[in-house]
Image (cartoon, grey):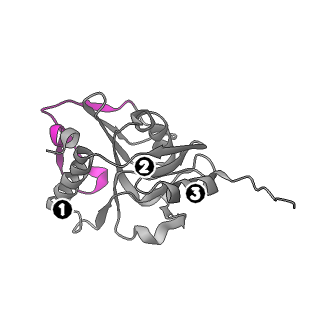
């Protein structure tokens, strides 16, 4: 009996892992398959508090939405995509579906990642990928190093050096996002 073997594409492998590991986030960054475990309580609360802050700032009235865990199609390599923790997107973002539940980068105004076990992805490849995609604002809530990094206004596919914020400070949301808001570093880091 002959057995046909099929080598999986990176996208097929990502799909298989997504089904095999419910609750995990599977992404392809710069041609590399990454898997992130489910969020811990502080991580989840940080995102909840972030959503509430944007609601109070009038995000809907500004013609925007915030979403969690929505795919961002990346221009870096053919199969690359990320699933940011939290994103500010144009209200009609669903019209920009590319494939695999991922949306075109031009509808993303701001992306937020809260670090977890694979913190180096948020501080390395994702900085490069989001800049190359032209995402205007990328915020990293860096729980490993106890600070928040604000990357903004990429030029030629690269962000300038990030602005760093420590405990006791607030991160100003850049005007390009479309709402005026200050985000307390302590709340972002701890979810309190």
Magenta span includes 177:
yes
Quadrant of the rendering where the N terminus is positioned: bottom right
Q: Nearer the viewer, residue 134 or 2?
A: 2
Quadrant of the rendering where the C terminus is positioned: top left
Q: Could you give the CA–CA distance between mark 3 and mark 2, rounded to whole angstroms?
A: 28 Å
On the image, numbered disc 2 is attached to which residue?
135
Q: Determine whether 10 is above or below 155 in the image.
A: below
In magenta, the rendered stretch is: 161-187
**How busy is the neighbourhood of tag 2: few (under 14 within 10 Å), some, or many (20 plus)?**
many
> Can you give x and y, in whole percent of width and height, for residue 106 in the image?
46, 58
On the image, numbered disc 1 is attached to which residue?
55
Q: Is residue 104 left or right of residue 114?
A: right
> Can you give x and y, in whole percent of width and height, for residue 146 in the image?
25, 29
On the image, numbered disc 3 is attached to which residue?
16
Q: Earlier in the sequence, mark 3 or mark 1?
A: 3
**How busy is the neighbourhood of tag 1: few (under 14 within 10 Å), some, or many (20 plus)?**
some
């Amino acid at each position: 009996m002959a057995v046909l073997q099929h080598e999986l594409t990176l996208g097929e492998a990502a799909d298989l892992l997504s089904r095999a590991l419910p609750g995990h986030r599977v992404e392809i960054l710069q041609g590399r398959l990454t898997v992130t475990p489910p969020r811990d309580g502080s991580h989840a609360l940080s995102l909840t508090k972030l959503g509430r802050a944007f609601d109070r700032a009038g995000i809907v009235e500004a013609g925007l939405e915030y979403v969690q865990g929505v795919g961002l199609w990346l221009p870096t390599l053919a199969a690359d995509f990320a699933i940011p923790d939290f994103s500010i997107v144009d209200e009609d973002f669903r019209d920009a579906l590319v494939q695999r539940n991922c949306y075109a980068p031009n509808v993303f105004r701001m992306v937020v990642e809260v670090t977890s076990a694979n913190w180096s992805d948020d501080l390395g490849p994702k900085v490069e990928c989001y800049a190359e995609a032209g995402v205007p604002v990328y915020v990293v809530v860096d729980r490993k190093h106890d600070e928040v990094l604000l990357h903004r206004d990429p030029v030629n596919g690269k962000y300038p050096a990030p602005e760093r914020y420590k405990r006791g400070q607030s991160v100003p949301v850049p005007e390009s996002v479309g709402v005026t808001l200050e985000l307390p570093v302590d709340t972002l880091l701890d979810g309190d």
